[in-house]
Image: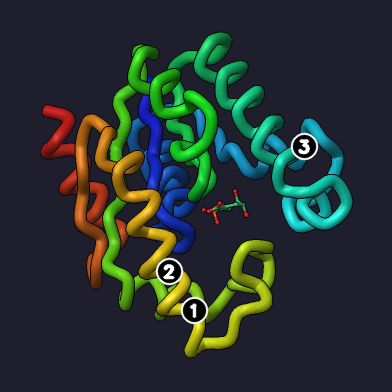
Amino acid sequence: MEIVLLGYMGSGKSTIAKYISDTMNLKLIDLDSYIEKQEGLSISNIFSSKGEIYFRKQEGFYLKEILETKSNFILALGGGTPCYGNNMQSINSSNAISIYLKGSISFLAERLKIGKNKRPLIANLNEEHLTEYIGKHLFERAPFYEQSNYKVKIDNKSIEEIYCDITVQLH
Ligand code: S3P
């Protein structure tokens, strides 16, 4: 089985993917970590030294590489992955099941206050601007996220509850 987790920054893709990997015995692939390993640079360093356009190009390339060559995995995407190039089309035409971890603006903003520094798109925003930015950004991205096979709401849920909601959808 192949599962792809997608959703906005801070929606818990990496954490849930790790949990699913352990419980369902699927290989864990985190796209950001995969890119960092292949490129030999952190995501922040790729953005600052090579720019976002380069990052998006590599992100699409590695996504396709994973979808075409790997099996039995749970893949956590980056927040922007579904929204660039033909990435969502590649995901939907593969064998993988795609799941959108859907959080509200306020929930995501609260989560992203902590840990925003390693995320180049929001690292320089103060708390006041963060909520406004997420609102606009999510509005632009939602049409891509909504193309996923399944949607799971995440606000105020534990990892176990989200996992349970995912397995209900898979059966
Ligand atoms: C991005 C999200 C990040 C990372 C990069 C760009 C985005 O991943 O891929 O900083 O465009 O939303 P996370 O969603 O894991 O933070």
- In the foreground, 14 or 86: 86
Q: Secondary structure at mark 2?
A: helix
- The mark found on residue 37 in the picture is 3
- The residue at 51%/46% (across/down) is 80
Give amino acid for label 2: Ile
Dot 2 crowding, Cα within 10 Å, few <14, some 14–19, many 20+: many
Q: Specify the quadrant of the image occupied by residue 33.
A: top right
Q: Is residue 162 above or below residue 87?
A: below
Tag of residue 130: 1
| Drawn side of residue 48 relative to residue 118, left or right | right
* Numbered circle sitting on residue 155: none
Residue 144: % across, % down: 35, 39
**Residue 154: x, y in percent?**
25, 60
| Alpha-carbon span between mark 3 and mark 2 | 28 Å
* Label 1 packing within 10 angstroms: few (<14), some (14-19), many (20+): many
**Labels 3 and 2: the sequence-earlier one:** 3
In the rendered view, would you say 153 is above or below 163? below
Report the amino acid beneath label 3: Lys
| Residue 83 screen position, x and y as percent | 46, 40
Q: For residue 114, what is the image quadrant? A: bottom right
Is any atom of residue 94 visible in this view?
yes
Q: Secondary structure at mark 1?
A: helix
Using a 10 Å C-alpha cutoff, classify the residue at mark 3 as few (fewer than 14 neighbours), some (14 to 19) or many (20 or more). few
Q: Nearer the viewer, mark 3 or mark 2?
A: 2
Say which quarter of the image contains residue 22. top left
Seen at 29% across and 62% down, the residue is: 103
Q: Which residue is mark 2?
A: 134
